Image (cartoon, helix red, strand yellow):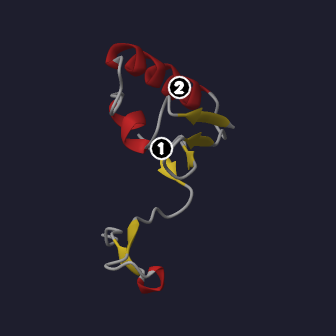
Amino acid sequence: MIFTGDAAKNRAELVSGTADMSLGHQASSRSITRIRDLFREHPGTVLIPGHDAAMAWPDDVDRPIRLAPVRAGLQIWPDDDLSLIHDVDLTLPKD
């Protein structure tokens, strides 16, 4: 297993090689490249990024795949009463 924390926060950073929201973009991009290379060099490794689902990188695909569905949503409350919480699902539909 590779735990990346915020060095590689999500699948998009691993695929693009570019860090989102970094104070040192060049250093962050080098770290992402090293993580991606290490991930590819060790088949069967599970990578756990800081803000995304766990991933694997099968030999027959050109990018990592998520091992669990990704969901996105918000909880909002329009008043001072927390019992009025509403869930808003922001998950993109499957193709």
Amino acid of disc 1: Pro
Amino acid of disc 2: Ile
Query: Closer to the camera, 37 or 75?
Result: 75
Q: Which residue is at 36% across, 41% downward?
A: 12
Q: Which residue is at 50% across, 33% downward?
A: 6
Whether residues under marks 1 and 2 lie with C-beta atoms below 8 angstroms apart, the answer is: no
Query: Closer to the camera, 79 or 23?
Result: 79
Residue 31, horizontal then vertical, whole percent = 47, 19
Q: CA distance from mark 1 to mark 2?
A: 12 Å
| Secondary element at image label 2 | helix
Extreme residue in the bottom direction: 84
* Quadrant holding the C terminus: bottom left
Query: Closer to the camera, 42 or 27?
Result: 27
| Secondary element at image label 1 | loop
Residue 72, horizontal then vertical, whole percent = 40, 64
Placement of 39 over or under 76, stated as above or below? above
* Quadrant holding the N terminus: top right
Residue matched to label 1: 64
Mark found first going from the N terminus, 1 or 2: 2
Residue matched to label 2: 35
